Image: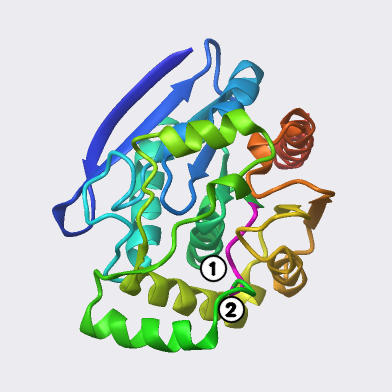
Amino acid sequence: MKHEEGFFKGIRDHQIYFQNWLPEGDVKAVLLIVHGLAEHSGRYMNLVHHFLPLGYAVYAIDHLGHGRSEGTRVFVERFTDYTDMVVAFREIIRDRQKDKPVFLVGHSLGGLIGALYLIEHQGELAGAVLSGPLVKVPDNILAITIILGKALSVLAPRLGLIAPPEAAGVSRNPAVVEAYETDPLVYRGKTTARLGSEILKAMQRIGAEAPRITLPLLILQGSADRLVSPSGAQILHDRIASPDKQIILYEDLYHEVYNEPEHNQVLLDVETWIDAHLRLAHPA
C-alpha cells in the first residue's frame, strides 16, 4: 500500500489537506471519499483496507474548517465552498488517475455535499454511494432554533449554535466511540450559525433539485441512526430520477455504517454494487 498526502490551494487561498492510498498493482477504479460533519478523512480506514486489495485507489480530502485543512472550524461562508473543493479535488484525481472511473462515497454531511455535487457534476463520475445522508432536518431541531440560526448567520455567523454530534450515536462499537471522542482531529465544539443555516439551504435545494440526479446511486442507512433522520435516505431515493438506484436499510445499525460491528457486510454490499457498475461501464 502506498499512502500519499499533501495540500492544495482551496477557496480564498485556504490550504486543503488531501490524502490517497494506492494499491500495489494496477488501479481499476477510484473511490472519492467525502466525509461528514466535524470529522476528517482519516476515519475511513475500514473502506481503505477493504477496497485497496481489490485494486481500488482511495482519495479523500478534509473539508474546509475540518481536520488538517485550514479555516475556522465547522464554518463556511457558503455551502458551495464545500462542493467547489470537491470539484477541485476531482481535477487532481483526473491528473493522477487518467481515464479511471471514479465513484463518490459521501457520508452524513458528505452525503449532502455529494448530492449537491451530483446535481452539477454527475457526468464526472461512474456512480455514487451515499451513507446516512444529512438531507432532512433532524426531528429534534426546534423551529425556534432554525429561526434563530438564520438570524445569527447574518449577525454572528461564527457563533457556536448547534451542539456537536452525540459520540455514542456514531456506532454501537465502544472502541469506535472512544476513538471518536479522543481523536484530536474530530471537532467537539458547536456548529457555527452560518454553517447551520447553509446546511438548511442545501437541504432545501436538494428537495427541489434532486430529480436532476440521474447517475447510478446506492444509498445506505442505519435504521437506528440517531444523528440524522433515517427517513431522509428514503426521501432522497424516491426523489432522484436515476433509473439505476438502490437503497439498503440496515436494521438496528447506527450512523456510521462503515464502523458498525456489521461493517464487513456493509462493505461487501458496496463492493458488489460498485463491481457491477464497473462491468456495466466496461463490459468484457
- Residue 132 in magenta stretch: yes
Point 46% across, 83% down: residue: 146
Q: Circle 2 sits on which residue?
A: 209
Point 39% across, 42% down: residue: 186
Point 63% across, 67% down: residue: 213
Point 34% across, 39% down: residue: 92
Query: In the rendering, at what x and y percent does residue 223 appear?
Result: 78, 55
Report which quarter residue 83 is drawn in: bottom left
The correct choice, above or below, for 48 with respect to 113 in the image is: above
Query: Residue furthest toward the right?
Result: 251
State which tag comes first along the sequence, 1 or 2: 1
Q: Which mark is residue 129?
A: none
Query: In the rendering, at what x and y percent does residue 52 appear?
Result: 58, 20
62 left or right, relative to 52: left
Amino acid at pointer 2: Glu
212 left or right, relative to 87: right
Query: In the rendering, at what x and y percent does residue 187 appear?
Result: 36, 48
The correct choice, above or below, for 115 with respect to 124 in the image is: below
Name the secondary structure under disc 2: helix
Residues at discs 1 and 2 in contact (Cβ within 8 Å): yes
Q: Which region shows up in magenta?
A: 131-137
The correct choice, above or below, for 186 with respect to 56 in the image is: below
Name the secondary structure under disc 1: helix
Q: Which mark is residue 119?
A: 1
Give the prevailing secondary structure in the magenta stretch.
Answer: loop
Amino acid at pointer 1: Ile
Using the image as rendered, state which of residue 133 and residue 29 is in the foreground.
Answer: 133
